[in-house]
Amino acid sequence: MRRGNLFLAASLGLLLAMPALATVIDDFSVDDLGNYTSTVILQNGVNTAAWQMGGGELGYNTTSYSNVNQVALIRNGLALGVGEEVQAAITRDSGTQDLGLYVGGVQPTAGVRSTYVSVYARGPSELYSRGFNGSSELGLEGATPASWDSLFITRTAINDYELGYYDGASRNVIVTRSGMTSNDGTYVGFYADIRSAGVLGTATELSVVPEPSALALGAVAAGAGLFCVRRRRARGFSGSGA
């Protein structure tokens, strides 16, 4: 193989092997909820509960339980652009409550569930996705993987989303939500479904990364650029010697 082709192949290999560079939004090392807004979007009972963070963990603690509540915890100022993916490392628990990610197109309002997608962990073995397209509830989709490290929501187009989980380097899509009604990813954070007293799981990091497919396309484009530069240099050298 010619040296130029070897250089191109090596460069492409390095680019494609590079991991997506994550922007860590919060590692929950300090107890600071000032960057978040919590809204009970479904309230079937009056619970005594609050989000808590610190020591590298975020959780939802219900000290007095009456009935089912669903809560959106939005990171103020965080939005998800097309080609971006929000991730959260979610620790399993042994209960039946739900903790995961939330991406919506309208500001959460007390007692209203509208225009959002979510993916969340329930207990030690179940993952689910649900949400609302406008005011219409989206069908429940689930998976029961043997293990997982983190959950993700990817905005693949203006109103399209992929929702799933990572198990090591394996990226697994549970469901694709297409043609959402005005869900432009303006409100990003966590989703919780409270069905008993106690601490609802924990999240250990919130990050945003480039969409994996977009990263791969960027690597191919960069490789093509290197190839074009190499060819131009080769032509210039050949021309000067004529």
Image: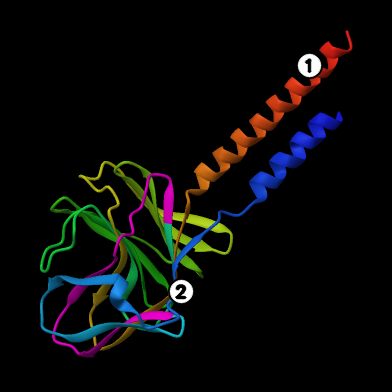
Decide whether residue 75 is among the magenta residues: yes
Residue at 64% across, 45% down:
16
Decide whether residue 49 is among the magenta residues: no
Tag nearer the camera, 1 or 2: 1
Q: Which residue is mark 2?
A: 27
Left or right relative to 209: residue 2: right
Q: Which residue is mark 1?
A: 235
Question: From which residue to which does the magenta span run?
Answer: 57-85
Crowding around mark 1 (Cα neighbors within 10 Å: few <14, some 14 to 19, many 20+) is few
Depth order, front residue of 139/52: 52
**x and y, in percent, of residue 47 in the image:** 15, 85
**x and y, in percent, of residue 150 in the image:** 47, 66
Residue 90 placement: quadrant? bottom left
- Residue kind at label 1, given as amino acid type: Arg
Residue 104 got which mark? none
- Residue kind at label 2, given as amino acid type: Asp
Depth order, front residue of 52/169: 52
Depth order, front residue of 62/34: 34
**x and y, in percent, of residue 83 in the image:** 43, 45
Quarter of the image for the C terminus: give it: top right
Q: Secondary structure at mark 1?
A: helix
Labels in figure, total:
2
Q: Residue farthest to the right?
A: 241
Of callouts 1 and 2, the N-terminal one: 2
Q: Residue farthest to the front?
A: 240
**x and y, in percent, of residue 161 in the image:** 35, 48
Q: Give the Cα distance between marks 1 and 2.
A: 51 Å
